[in-house]
Image (tube, helix red, strand yellow):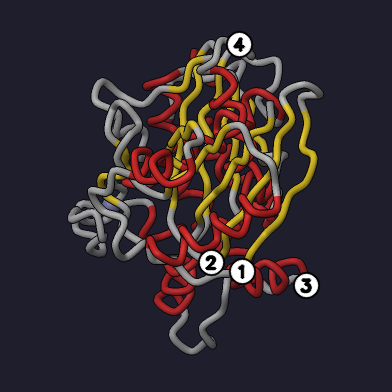
Amino acid sequence: MKILGIDVGGSSIKFVLWDELIDSIITQGKIPFQPPTLNQFFSILNTLLSNFKVDKIGIAVPGTLDLNREYSIFVPNLQDWNSVPLKFLIENEYKIETGLENDANSAAYAEYVLGSGKNTNGIVLLTLGTGVGGGVVLHGELMVGANGGGAELGHFCIDVNGFPCNCGSNGCLEQYVSIHGIKRLGELLDPHRRSLSPQEWSELADKGDSFAKFLWEKIGHYIGLGVSSYVNIFHPSKVVIGGGISNAGEKLLNPIRHTVQKRAFKSLVSDLTIEKALLGDFAGAIGISLLSIKKRGKNYE
Ligand SMILES: [Zn+2]
């Protein structure tokens, strides 16, 4: 059985063709794209399906889904994807069984099975990119909440009077440690500096720039505030930090570890590790492929 796993992102669409027989990727690709409308997405899907023979489709969606994984409910960064019966539309058009999952949940499952969380009892994944997403896998099960909308770990409030968030709340972690959040944080902390991307701040810190180093301490501290609570709530074996911003590496991970050691329950952090994700850009596409297989009975626990 061959599964086409597609991860719809804010700046590109990533896909893998996964072969269940050999438990591996046959081919993969990344199509640079601004957030696609539904029509644009279907045209890309058309092209992919005309190139590959596929038995099943999995879509990792950057938003919330209904409990039965049939509808995309709230997709803040994709214009006309709210309240869409995506599973029905694709199955009706192509007559191929289709599964949906949230993109960060998919990535968390992939990291648990094949990546940084392999051989653990459970992980919390936090993905830092255009948005801040998260996923929780415990004893082989992806946690989606009682009604399907979990786990939106990027919308943990770190400042009750903080910046308004596009979820409707204020002071969410996403507002401080996403790509846009880090740019704004840099400008706020030193208005005389040019506005820089996380990658530029990372390069500056590596060259020894003391303000850039301070900025990464601050970012790590904010993430650590969120992670401390995730640790207290879920008691994972490991916390995995993914997304493009995690490429900052140890200068980001160390202040996260420091804050978590200080703030989370001591009994819960003694055996905890906090590491970078291993699967990179394709984690979401791999994860939705694995989840499609799991639903057929193959268990990766
Ligand atoms: Zn929010």
Q: Looking at the image, which residue is at 40% across and 60% down?
A: 176
Point out which mark residue 207 bears. Answer: 3
Judging depth in this view, the residue of 16 and 105 nearest the camera is: 16
Residue type, numbered disc 3: Lys
Asked which secondary structure carries label 2, the reply is loop
Mark 4 or mark 2, earlier in chain: 2
Instruction: State the residue position of label 2.
Output: 11
Residue 80 on image: x %, y %: 29, 62
Q: CA distance from mark 2 to mark 3?
A: 28 Å
Q: Are marks 4 and 2 in contact (CB under 8 Å)?
A: no
Label located before the other in sequence (2 or 3): 2
Mark 4, residue position: 299
Q: Spatial distance from mark 2 to mark 1, Cα to Cα?
A: 6 Å
Q: Residue at x 57, y 31 (%)?
A: 239
Residue ID for mark 1: 32
Q: Nearer the viewer, mark 2 or mark 3?
A: 2
Of the residues under marks 1 and 3, which one precedes in the sequence?
A: 1
Q: For the residue labelled by badge 4, is the local secondary structure a helix, a strand or a loop? A: loop
Q: Residues within 10 Å of mark 1 (few under 14, many from 20)?
A: few
At label 2, which amino acid type do we have?
Ser
- The label number, if any, that marks residue 99 in the structure image: none
Q: Give whichever of 82, 272 is nearer the camera.
A: 82
